[in-house]
Image (cartoon, grey):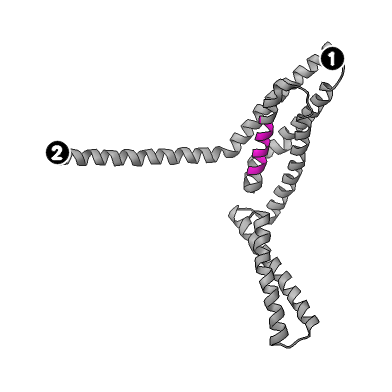
């Protein structure tokens, strides 16, 4: 569940629970105001945590993950987000206008991969090549390219190095697009299947309609 929505749900249950617990202890059991306040706070905290445990359990069940698996994925997603921010900074430090669109597209794809794996954590297992290999290589090359592109003097060797670095970045950009395709491949296959089924249903309906019209004209 979205963290903000989860917080709203917990709060919307915890506050009325705390209020009710306080009133019941104060007027139902005639305890002191101080003790009633303590019971109210304890009741609210207990309700907040209980709802949190329930929503987390449902989230894990929905995505077919164990708590251990989700901790592993969440830890790597947090690290991945820091790396993407670092890549963003490096790519927009590069002083090369012709490659600007390519860099924007690259960031768009990396952020799409991150969003998909954050919203549906089980997809992370299909994105491990991106998080553990391609992303690190992109950062290293982008930072090197950004550093070299800011040098005031351009020797032939430096120009060649910049060219080779750009070519490697191009290849990695293609690899990242393939990573995205790999992550959503099952969705594409499912959509293809559903389209085929829908086409078959339409063909059957049209055939039945044609047969019925011919029968009526006889």
Q: Quadrant of residue 37?
A: bottom right
- Residue 173: image location, x then y, percent: 67, 28
Helix, strand or loop status at disc 2: helix
Specify whether residue 62 is in view.
yes
Magenta stretch: residue 110 in it?
yes
- Residue 12: image location, x then y, percent: 65, 66
Q: In the rendered image, which residue does mark 1 sit on?
A: 154
Which disc number belongs to residue 217? 2
Vertical relation: 178 (above or below) 42: above
In the rendered structure, which disc, 1 or 2, sits on the residue that comes first in sequence?
Answer: 1
**Residue drawn at 60 percent across, 39 percent down:** 183
Q: Which SS type dominates the magenta stretch? A: helix
**Residue drawn at 84 percent across, 22 percent down:** 150
Query: Between 158 and 187, which is closer to the camera in this rendering?
Result: 158
Helix, strand or loop status at disc 1: loop
**Residue drawn at 58 percent across, 55 percent down:** 62
- Residue 44: image location, x then y, percent: 71, 71
Specify whether residue 124 is in view.
no
- In the rendered structure, the answer to whether residue 214 lies left or right of residue 19 reads left
Vertical relation: 210 (above or below) 28: above
Number of other residues with Cα within 10 Å of mark 1, as a class: few under 14, some 14 to 19, many 20 or more? few
Residue at far bottom of view: 30
- Residue 203: image location, x then y, percent: 32, 38
Which disc number belongs to residue 211? none
Query: Between 2 and 176, which is closer to the camera in this rendering?
Result: 2
Q: Quadrant of residue 109?
A: top right
């Amino acid at each position: 569940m979205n963290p903000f929505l989860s917080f709203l749900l917990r709060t919307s249950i915890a506050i009325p629970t705390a209020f009710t617990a306080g009133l019941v202890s104060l007027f139902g059991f005639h305890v002191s105001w101080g003790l009633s306040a303590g019971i109210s706070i304890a009741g609210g905290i207990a309700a907040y945590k209980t709802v949190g445990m329930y929503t987390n359990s449902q989230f894990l069940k929905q995505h077919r993950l164990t708590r251990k698996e989700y901790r592993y994925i969440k830890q790597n997603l947090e690290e991945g987000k820091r790396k993407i921010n670092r890549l963003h900074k490096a790519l927009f430090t590069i002083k090369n206008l012709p490659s600007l669109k390519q860099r924007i597209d690259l960031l768009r794809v990396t952020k799409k991969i991150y969003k998909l794996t954050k919203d549906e954590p089980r997809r992370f297992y299909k994105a491990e090549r991106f998080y553990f290999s391609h992303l690190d290589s992109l950062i290293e090359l982008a930072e090197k390219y950004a550093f070299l592109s800011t040098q005031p003097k351009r020797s032939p060797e430096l120009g060649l190095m910049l060219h080779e670095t750009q070519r490697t970045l191009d290849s990695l950009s293609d690899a990242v697009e393939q990573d995205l395709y790999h992550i959503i491949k099952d969705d594409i296959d499912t959509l293809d299947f559903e389209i085929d089924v829908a086409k078959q249903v339409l063909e059957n309906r049209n055939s039945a309609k044609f047969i019925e019209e011919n029968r009526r004209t006889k």
